[in-house]
Image (tube, coloured by chain):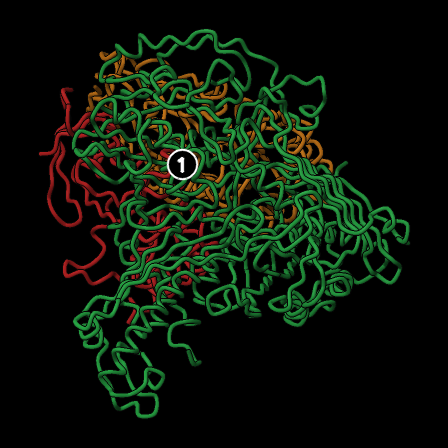
Chain colours: A orange, B red, C green
Amino acid sequence: MVRYITPHSLNEALQILDQEEHCLPLAGGTDLTLLVRDRTVQVECLLDISKLPELVGVHQEGGEIRIGPSTTLADVASSPQLPTALRTGAGWIGSPQIRALGTIGGNICNASPCGDTLSPLLVLGGRFRLRSAGGEREVPAEAFFLGPKRTILTRGELLVGIHLPREDDRRSTFRKIGGRGAQTIAQVNLAISACWREGILRQPRLAVGSAAPTPIRIPAVERILDGQSLGDEVIAEAAERTAAEIRPICDQRASDRYRRWVVRALFRDALSSLTEQEVYG
Amino acid sequence: MSEINTRGSTSGGTDFKSVPIAFRLNGRPVSACIDGGLRALDLLREGFGLTGVKEGCGRGECGACTILLDGRPVNACLLLAAKLEGCEVLTIEGMASPDGTLHPLQAAFLKAGAVQCGFCTPGMVLAAKSLLDARPNPNEEEIARALSGNFCRCTGYTKIIKAVHLAAEEMRR
Amino acid sequence: MTAPFRTIGQPVSKIDGVELVTGRARYTADLQFPGTLQAVARRAGFAAGLLHRLDVEEARRSPGVVLVLTPADLPGPNLIGILPPFDQPLLAGPEIRHEGDSLALVVAETQDQAEAAASLIVAEIEPFPPLLDPEEAMRPEARKIHPNGNLTFAKQLLKGDVEAGFSLAEVIVEDTYRTSVQDHAYLEPEAVLAVPESDGRLTVYASCQSPFHLRGHIAANTGLPASRVKVVQPFVGGSFGGKDDAVTEMGSLAGAAALKLGRPVRIVHSRRDSFLGSHARHAAIIHLKTGALRDGTIVARQAEILLDGGAYASESPFVVMKALIHVAGPYKIPHLRVDCRAVYTNKRQAGAMRGFGVPQVTFASESQIDALARELSFDPWELRRRNALTVGEANATGQVFQESVGLIQTLELVKVEGEWPACWEKAHAGSNPRFKRGVGLAAMMQGISNGAEGVDVVGASVQVSQDGSVLVGLGLTELGQGSRTAMAQIAAEILGVRLEKISVRQVDTDTVHDSGPTVASRTTTVGGKAVWMAAQAVRTSLLEMAGLMFKAPAEAIELGEDLAYLRENQEAQIPLAQVATAAYWTGFPLMNLAFSRAPDAQYDHETHQGQIYIAYNYGAHLMEVEVDTWTGKVRVLRHLASHDVGKVINPLGVEGQVEGAALMGLGFAHLEEVLQENGKVRNANFADYQIPSFAERLPTRFLAVEEATPNGPFGAKGIGEPPLAGTAAAFANAVSDALGISFTRLPITPQRILEALEG
């Protein structure tokens, strides 16, 4: 028997999580339902945080954008105030059906290396606010992921906010390759953000998913690109370096070699799209 | 109130059902008392006899169990029944008019030959309805993208796209 | 009958379509009976080994469990199969032959309880190193998977003198081709529901393809006479050859449990169960050698085909025969030697799947035709045309048809519509370093009917009621392919009634004649012929009655639009209902049971020469692709599929079959592969097993050729299977053409493309 609690406020939710040992927070449920059904997790109580007003919606606050973790992937994908990479990544997850239920917080906390919002969050300077009954902390997105399905979240702690700095002159883009053209899991995904002015790329950030136990930034390539005008040679060097820097696994979805080959294509496509697109507002 | 076990028959249930829910199902108010781990798929099929909601994979990968939740297509196999509370649910059984007249999408699927074995059809029709309600005149790519969460193994998809075009035309009249 | 037809050849919506689009159609898992129990099999989890101990005590005590069925509890032989001696146990042990072997069946009040209990069963298995490679399994020292060794079935085809043929050859090409395991991946997983009846009989509702096959095995394994078992086929959510073995196993187990408990027992496979516990398409290794003259005339071909049959024989013997006969392709080759074998390995068994061995050998054959064209510097279309079978020419088995050989017409159509060879030149005119274009051709043929694989008799009944409505019964099954609609059209045409007046009932073994399996693209051809015959008999009654009413000879009367009327004076009409009522009161028979029997195959079992199939479907495909050399992704830009279908009964249905088979062919050639590691399936779900999605849909255009066969109704030949092989072969040739690399292994996945490009 599983109990199901719908708290009225974030504080109430945090109190319950604090007190109930076998209570799991549930947002859209598109991942958790399967774990419960497969008996991968034993659950006595589910805490539905998907409708808590504090956790839903996209808000502009001063110099930053705050995304409530219970915002659905569909809403993230269609929020014009969000950066292109994040919207695109969210729009590539699963299917319309999954995106209507699944949330960005769920995608983050599920911590799959192939999660399509993760590499965008890494290149957008995302910070996660975590809160428990005992207090609150904020961490950069990169510090959050420990390994496949493992994060720094402790018992009783909830992701309560995703914060992106507003950088009006920063552009971003996202690319993904999977076994199919739709309804597919990333064999590799990749996000780039940078400032692109007068033909020069500045402060670039590059992240790759499904290429290591967690989504990773590739600082070596960022250094190659910084301050460059993106001639063929630079692009070629950066693409090769990206392939060399990732540490992909070989599994039923793709070989490590294939992931290294296609990441070069994703990188080139992302870069050309980045330098042609409009700056987001 | 229907008493529903997790993925089981309605008989022989002795478990305590802790969660009362009320929602609108195909236009009618309904209520049930359920276990928190119950899937919407099982509630609809076994509790309400709506077997037009199909289970093809149980993992949100095929779309056969698609229903509309407040107008949006979702996988009933990934949806906990408790989440139906207060929502408006549409299944394929609620698509035709009460007098039996087919919805233009249903008629178009037949006319275009978009139905073979029919197992994917309920989910496909519902996903298409959600699209046409939002976009009365979609192009081919929009249709393909809106239905991309639904697999069909029989038709090769082409006639399904044709059917949605046909229905859109009919509905714009 | 006088042309033009009223119904035949018209695009007709499915007669059972309203049920399907409204959700009213009930599939097996949708049926509800009071007190139904749920059952789950505990699977071995090892590809090979010896079961030392099976402890089900804890499972028996688990909440909700009412029965755990073990081999000792089965009253029958605990064996199923296609050809005796049967080799597949319902519940395995002590020998474990593949990961998905069922060891015990847990029956409980709910599915959850059954699943939980199944995980409590303790199976002590001593694992063996699994035999996974069919070539390794053929070595004399290999461990025997079955007592008689690892060779499941072997056949040889000999035509002419192959050595002499090759000695004439001026050019010889030779290669080895490989294809992989493809899953049927119908959207509805296998399901059965066994209901013990109060009269001592057993009813089994089953998502199945061949109800009489099930009935026989369920009877044997439950200890009931076959006459006490009724198998009912509700709506079926796709089959493609897949719903035989597994459903037979499930039906027998559920039947045994239901009889023991006196309660209905249901088994519904999860998607994972479907991948582990049902059969799939044979992976193949095909060594092929072709010899030709410089002028393009093929003079000899030699093939060794090795089919990976997996753990049990299933349909392997028949797939062996089909591959054997079809590896020569649709060509007149005077000298042939083909050896085809199926072998046991420790994998899920291979059996029937849409195409039945033909897609594998067509890929090999058509790849080699392209290789030969390159070797000869010959236009690949011209090479196919030069060697194409025609009326009056002997095919691989020496069979000569005097009609209905439309191969050249299909080749001509794709040439004209595809603008070959201009399209090829255009595709190669581009100089994009990243995106490469190519055009591929394929020609193929596929035998229609069981042919040499077995007796081919189908029973059908046609019954006209006094109100002029018609009930058709047939022993072959509707699986989504639209056969019910085609049968209705045939009856409607002959009886002159509107389609709405016709019902074609679901198959129930109590009410129709055992007509063998719904396979081999034979439903329209052989089944339709039976309906045609039965309808003709009832038509005779109606015409005679109408003759009496009109006071005119029967020949002067025609039926149409629910009326009987005089040919010479169409204003003189009597409603058909009145004729039927009068016929009833006059005592004229308004029902007929007819049997269509395909001419028996006449052939030599040693050489496989003779009259084997009643007709062949011929086809030619042209496909243009664009390959992204950075990612290996392939976009299909154009696909022409021309087939000689004899006569189009329902254009909508035929197009649907072509488009659906084509996309399944793309899956076979490009995306789909059941991956196994140490005999364990690694992608038993749709996230990792890549069936095509909307994004992969093909721009298939069907071009019909209608060379009628006297052996099918109105000349029709089956179309359910052939386009799959044509599409797959054309795809392989197109990608090879685009990249200038000969791909000899399917599927040609993006990863394999990059492996070939990157070296």
Mark 1 crowdedness (10 Å alpha carbons): few <14, some 14-19, many ≥20: few
The residue located at (55%, 67%) in the rendering is: C709
Helix, strand or loop for disc 1: loop
Residue C477 at x, y = what percent? 38, 50
Q: Which residue is mark 1?
A: A63
Residue C476 at x, y = what percent? 40, 51
Residue B38 at x, y = what percent? 24, 28
Question: Which chain contains the residue that carries disc 1?
Answer: A
Residue C162 at x, y = what percent? 82, 48
- Foreground: B18 or A13? B18
Kind of residue indicated by mark 1: Gly
On screen, residue A275 versus residue C298, left or right, reads left
- Foreground: B64 or C267? C267
- Foreground: C385 or A220? C385
- The part of the image, by quadrant, that contains residue C285 is top right
On screen, residue B160 versus residue C201, left or right, reads right
